[in-house]
Image: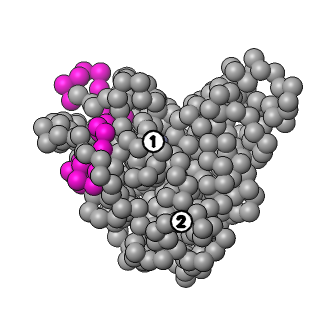
Amino acid sequence: MTARVVDTPRVAYLVSNDLVKVSSLLPSNKNRSILVHSLVKSYGLLSRPQMRVAPPIPADINALTMYHSRDFIECLVDPRTCAADADSIRLEQFGIEEDCPAFRGLSAYVKLVAGAVLTATKQLSSGESDIAICWDGGRHHAQKSRASGFCYVADCVLAMLALKRMRIPTPVPPSTASPRKARVMYLDLDLHFSDGVSHAFHRSNPPSGPPQILTLSIHHAAPGFFPSSPLAALPDPDDAALDPLTLSLPLARGASNASMLRVWRSVECVKDAFAPDYVVVQCGADGLVGDPYAVWNWALGGEGGFGWCVQNVCQWGAKVLLLGGGGYNSPNVARAWTYLTSIALGEPLALDTDIPDHQGFPLYSPSFTLDVPTGNARDENTEEYLHSIEQRFVRIAEIIRQRVQVDD
Ligand SMILES: [Zn+2]
């Protein structure tokens, strides 16, 4: 692939009043959406010349069933699902209970969130945008026929299925050979393992066709920590059953910029081997300092920080789709996604900049700045463990490279 790093990227930002309204009703993240978009707007990022604000086109049943089962989608969009006397057995069957309760606006939410990421993929594949942002997407736990972990619709999976059908955005030099199919890399930075996405694309036996999708989830894994999955463990290149296109990079408690900086070599190694045309980044912010989960000690700024990682991805030369995800300290999530938006625009805000005066201003107490600095928790990722990750990923990258070469 011919990498093309764009100095001033053209950015599409997916938002509409309807999307913000229904996303703000999400029970796990009440009012987070309005806070995020308000902060992004208050810094003037939506009126930059390279920014295109794109309203989502709601997804219809056909688009949603490109991945989900029809009966699950019919239940999600059925107005009776949100009624007080809803059929509890039916809801239970589809996981619409406990941490994924039915809520007013669920039907519109599902159509608009899926529609937003699908509209974003069109912005990228049409060549209108280099980076597309959909902070209301990134629901990485939703399954084919079941809501799970605060996630109702598998927008990440739908986006990747759409992108793999699209043409290669950066044409290879003129050649008589027929163009290969697009390659899509999914990188998940959320504290939790991307079970919904990884399971959707995991294959026990390599498919006969050329590889088109690779998933890599960096997450916390520990006994009892959600979600439990055999795919959440560190992959073993000696395992004959390894799917080198479904990868996990689990980190221990207290993961900080230093650990992220160290494992980033492995991320780059995988990226270089796979040479993606499109990169979908799930930017869950629950690994940041100050999140109620309080597991990692990851900062927004600095080398190895959240912004540094996303800035690197934006400079890979692929088309990039930035999605949201977890994050339960809403002001910190708004800080993070605002900063990432400025990075996508190629104009990173200074982290010591003051929060502008706007409706959400009092929530940014006591610092009233954009930064989410590192905390005091000890990083429990040992040098020995980080070294073993690196060694394994060097070998896995070689396996990927061999798979990809047959396609080039
Ligand atoms: Zn999470």
Residue at horizontal 54%, vertical 65%?
364
Depth order, front residue of 320/323: 323
Q: Rate crowding at label 2 as few (under 14), some (14 to 19) or many (20 or more) other CA atoms within 10 Å.
A: some
Query: Is the residue indicated by label 1 positioned so its CB lies within 8 Å of ligand 1?
Result: yes
Q: Which residue is mark 2?
A: 364
Q: Position of residue 384 (x, y in %)?
A: 12, 37
Q: Is residue 171 something one can see in this rendering?
A: no
Q: Position of residue 355 (x, y in %)?
A: 52, 74
The quarter holding residue 317 reads bottom left
Farthest residue in the front direction?
366
Residue at horizontal 17%, vertical 40%?
382
Residue at horizontal 27%, vertical 31%?
234
Q: Position of residue 205 (x, y in %)?
A: 36, 23
Q: Mark 1 belongs to which amino acid? A: Tyr
Q: Which residues are magenta?
A: 237-263
In 3D space, how far apart are the residues under numbered discs 1 and 2 (Cα atoms)? 19 Å
Is residue 360 magenta-colored? no
Q: Which residue is mark 1?
A: 293
The residue tagged with tag 1: helix, strand or loop?
loop
Q: Is residue 277 left or right of residue 303?
A: right
Q: Is residue 55 left or right of residue 80?
A: left
Q: Position of residue 142 (x, y in %)?
A: 57, 34
Depth order, front residue of 48/21: 21
The residue tagged with tag 2: helix, strand or loop?
helix
Residue at horizontal 42%, vertical 29%?
225
Considering only vertical position in the picture, is 304 above or below 82? below
